[in-house]
Amino acid sequence: MNQYLNYLIPLLFLIIFPLFWIFITTLLRKVSGMSKELNVIQGQHIKTSLWGSAKVNGITARNCIRVKEYEYGYIFEVMWLLGAGKLWLAKDGLQIGEVNKASFFRPLTLKLLYKKDKVTVYGKLIQAFTS
């Protein structure tokens, strides 16, 4: 019996962990208001930022989110391993706040508001909105 447990526990882990991972990433994507596919008119692609950190509707993504700028708005895109969520913020109606200065314990931050979506970008992702 004991020898079967030595094989059963790793086997259960290999089955349960991916299912748990998919469940958690799907839950976080839905809570943050992100989706897998976007049905919006984006216009021409302008630029893509490097990976950085942001808080999207209360869910924090550390060094796993990037901003793609298009003619008509921005797409926030999370890495595929973490659920591949996407959020569209149109330039028309987007409220961009002031850049909050960094302190010893806080990085540079910039708050964005678009309808019901609240996004705070940190550090190097701010360049996507200031340049």
Image: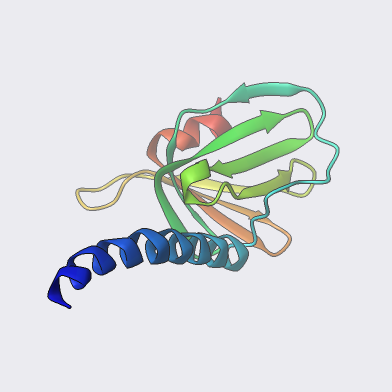
Q: Is residue 35 left or right of residue 56?
A: right
Task: Give the quadrant of residue 56.
Answer: bottom right
Could you say which is closer to the camera, residue 24 or residue 5? 5
Is 74 displayed left or right of 11 in the figure?
right
Where's residue 114, x and y in %? 70, 55
Q: Is residue 131 left or right of residue 45?
A: left
Q: Classify residue 42 by image quadrant.
A: top right
Residue at the extreme bottom of the image, as rendered: 1
- In the image, residue 128 above or below residue 9: above
Residue 24 location in percent, x, y? 48, 65
Q: Residue furthest left?
A: 2
Toward which corner of the image does residue 47 lie, by quadrant? top right
In front of the other: 128 or 95: 128
Where does residue 20 sit, x and y in percent of width and height? 44, 66
Q: Up-down: is 15 above or below 87?
A: below
Is residue 17 found left or right of 57 in the rendered image? left
Q: Is residue 95 visible?
A: no
From this viewpoint, is residue 97 visible? yes
